[in-house]
Image: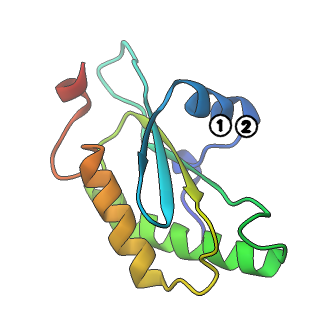
């Protein structure tokens, strides 16, 4: 099961905006790029996620898709704790084809804390 449609980055234009203007946070296995959406309405947009896995990680699509499913599962677990109003692209670094779900969950949680996206931080905190 994937992410809810509201929480997905879809177009290449959205990915490109996050890559160009977003802040970068990295760990051993993951790179997180965050772009805060400055919306004038009182209801901030839900946080949207995109996952990018290069063929440098693995030439096999089966392996890349498994990694995407593991990362999506980790995002689903953390989604209730994530502040709204951000666009996030998660990239995988290097050779992590043997990496387990628990490792992705732990590293993603650390990166989201480092980026101040979870644990009660709201969008107004950053404006």
**Is label 2 in a helix, a strand or a loop?**
loop
Q: Which residue is identified by label 2?
A: 11
Location of residue 37 (image quadrant)? top left
Residue 121's tag is none
Task: Work out how far the residue at label 2 is from the one at label 1, CA to CA, in angstroms.
Answer: 7 Å
When the figure is inspected, residue 96 is found, relative to residue 121, above or below; the finding is below
When the figure is inspected, residue 111 is found, relative to residue 96, above or below; the finding is above
Q: Which residue is identified by label 1?
A: 15
User: At which x and y percent is residue 90?
Assistant: 54, 53
Q: Quadrant of the N terminus?
A: bottom right
User: At which x and y percent is residue 73?
Assistant: 49, 73
Residue positioned 52% across, 24% down in the render: 21
**In the displayed structure, does residue 31 sit left or right of residue 42?**
right
**In the displayed structure, does residue 62 sit left or right of residue 88?**
right
Q: Are marks 2 and 1 in contact (CB under 8 Å)?
A: yes
**In the displayed structure, does residue 68 sit left or right of residue 121?**
right
């Amino acid at each position: 099961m994937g992410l809810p449609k509201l929480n997905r980055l879809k177009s290449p234009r959205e990915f490109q905006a996050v890559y160009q203007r977003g802040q970068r946070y990295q760990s051993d296995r993951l790179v997180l790029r965050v772009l805060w959406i400055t919306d004038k309405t009182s209801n901030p947009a839900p946080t949207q996620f995109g996952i990018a896995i290069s063929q440098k990680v693995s030439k096999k699509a089966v392996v890349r898709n498994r990694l995407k499913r593991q990362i999506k599962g980790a995002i689903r677990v953390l989604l209730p704790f994530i502040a709204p109003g951000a666009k996030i692209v998660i990239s995988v670094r290097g050779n992590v084809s043997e990496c387990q779900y628990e490792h992705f969950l732990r590293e993603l949680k650390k990166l989201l804390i480092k980026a101040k996206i979870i644990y009660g931080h709201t969008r107004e905190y950053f404006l």
